[in-house]
Image (spheres, rainbow, N blue to C red):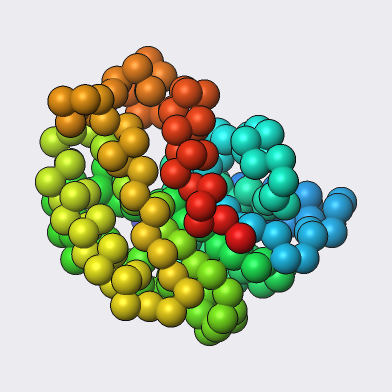
Amino acid sequence: MKNILSIFLLLTFSFFFSQGKKPVYWQDIQNFKKLDRKDAPPKDAILLIGSSSFTRWTDVGNYFPDKTIINRGFGGSKLSDLNYYADDLLSPYQPKQIIIFCGENDFADNPQLKAKEAVDRFKAFYNKIRKRFPDIEVDYMSIKYSPSREKLWPQMKKANRKIACFMKKEKNAKFIDITKIMEDSNGNVRKDLFLKDMLHMTPEGYKLWTSVMKPYMK
């Protein structure tokens, strides 16, 4: 009888514990909602969606002073996270353009991930955008080749090529390649554009990104 009671209590505890556990990045999304309640998001803005390279670009408006930008980069998000939170990331806004930077963490989270799987995740999110915004400009910024993740570059390069081909066939869609601007004269990735973690960007790195992004921005 005691064993049955112990099992029952354990299962009950496990159930309530699991019910109270929030999904990854749940708090980030709640913070976005809080910001939107405080200040209504502007219409016809450029909406940035993606992972930590956008999250950390807190002064992105200073790089594009003539643009209205809503930055909704969060944590170390993956394309799978963008799909999970798609409604929260899209429904509050009426943008004239969406720029996506995400995908690098998908490979870092699962080194065995095939390029096609990452591309399929992107296509799923792209289709969700198109259901809500059939005519606006939607651009994808290429996965950057961070020195700390060099072993994953082959899959990332394949994913970039496949997404570039996909976007080329789509209407009002562009592939923004930021990999070339981050290379030196010998074609090597410039490590000086990264912080000590060899993953996140320096202000100089963002300055170079700006020079590539400007011609694409509405």
Residue 1 vs residue 106: left or right?
A: right
Q: Position of residue 34 (x, y in %)?
A: 78, 51
Q: Where is the N terminus found, in terms of image quarters?
A: bottom left
Residue 19 vs residue 146: left or right?
A: right
Look at 14% across and 36% down and name the residue there: 151
Look at 87% across and 51% down and name the residue there: 38
Look at 52% across and 24% down and name the residue there: 203
Name the residue nearer the viewer: 26 or 144. Answer: 144
Look at 70% across and 60% down and name the residue there: 45
Marks counted in the figure total 0
Is residue 1 at least partly visible in the picture?
no
Q: Using the image, determine if residue 206 lies above or below residue 1.
A: above
Q: Position of residue 64 (x, y in %)?
A: 65, 41
Name the residue nearer the viewer: 106 or 200. Answer: 200
Q: Position of residue 205 (x, y in %)?
A: 44, 28
Q: Where is the C terminus found, in terms of image quarters?
A: bottom right
Q: Position of residue 65 (x, y in %)?
A: 71, 40
Q: Using the image, determine if residue 73 lies above or below residue 40.
A: above
Is residue 156 at least partly visible in the picture?
yes
Q: Using the image, determine if residue 147 lies above or below residue 38.
A: above
Q: Which image quarter: residue 174?
A: bottom left
